[in-house]
Image: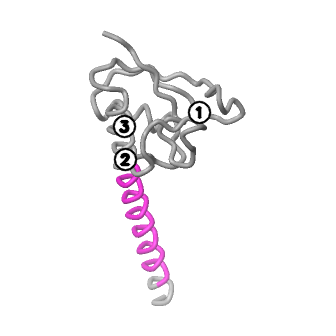
Amino acid sequence: MKECVIWTANLDKRKSRKEGRKIPKRFSVPGVRLSELEAACKALGIDCTAEQKKYPRSWWEEGGRVLVGKTSSKTQLMIKLAQKISELREIEEQKRAKKEKGKKKAKEKKKKKGKKK
């Protein structure tokens, strides 16, 4: 089976096609991190090897790449990964909001207890 390389820059919405974005903007995600890309691969059940490397066109920026086994076209694979990253971000945001809401309620309870005494 062939392997293909997917850079974080290939999925980044803030990059132009010249700067390395490979998929249409409507599918891409802003500010992709290597950890997110690796998590998306694992969530989709794709074996991957993550490498902390610099993208040659923007060697001054942090980023990285994953090596994945090619099962379908590279473009379709990148679109699936970008969609999964956005889903994972939504889930993470919901968890964070729920945690914040719980902290707020706990503070309110403490205030009420303090007033009663």
Q: Which residue is drawn at the image coordinates 57% and 44% (left, top)?
A: 15
In this figure, which residue is indicated by the disc labeled 3?
81
- Disc 1 to disc 3: CB gap under 8 Å: no
Please tell me whether residue 30 belongs to the stretch shown in magenta.
no
- Disc 2 to disc 3: CB gap under 8 Å: no
Determine the image quadrant of residue 67: top left
Q: Residues within 10 Å of mark 3 (few under 14, many from 20)?
A: many
| Mark nearer the N terminus (2 vs 1) | 1
Name the kind of residue labelled 2 in the image.
Leu
Magenta stretch in the rendered image: 89-111
Name the kind of residue labelled 3 in the image.
Leu
Counting labels gives 3
Question: In the image as oriented, which residue stretches furthest toward the top?
Answer: 1
Give the Cα distance between marks 1 and 3.
16 Å
Q: Nearer the viewer, residue 94 or 104?
A: 94
In this figure, which residue is indicated by the disc labeled 2?
88
Name the spot of residue 102 as percent of width and height, x first: 40, 67
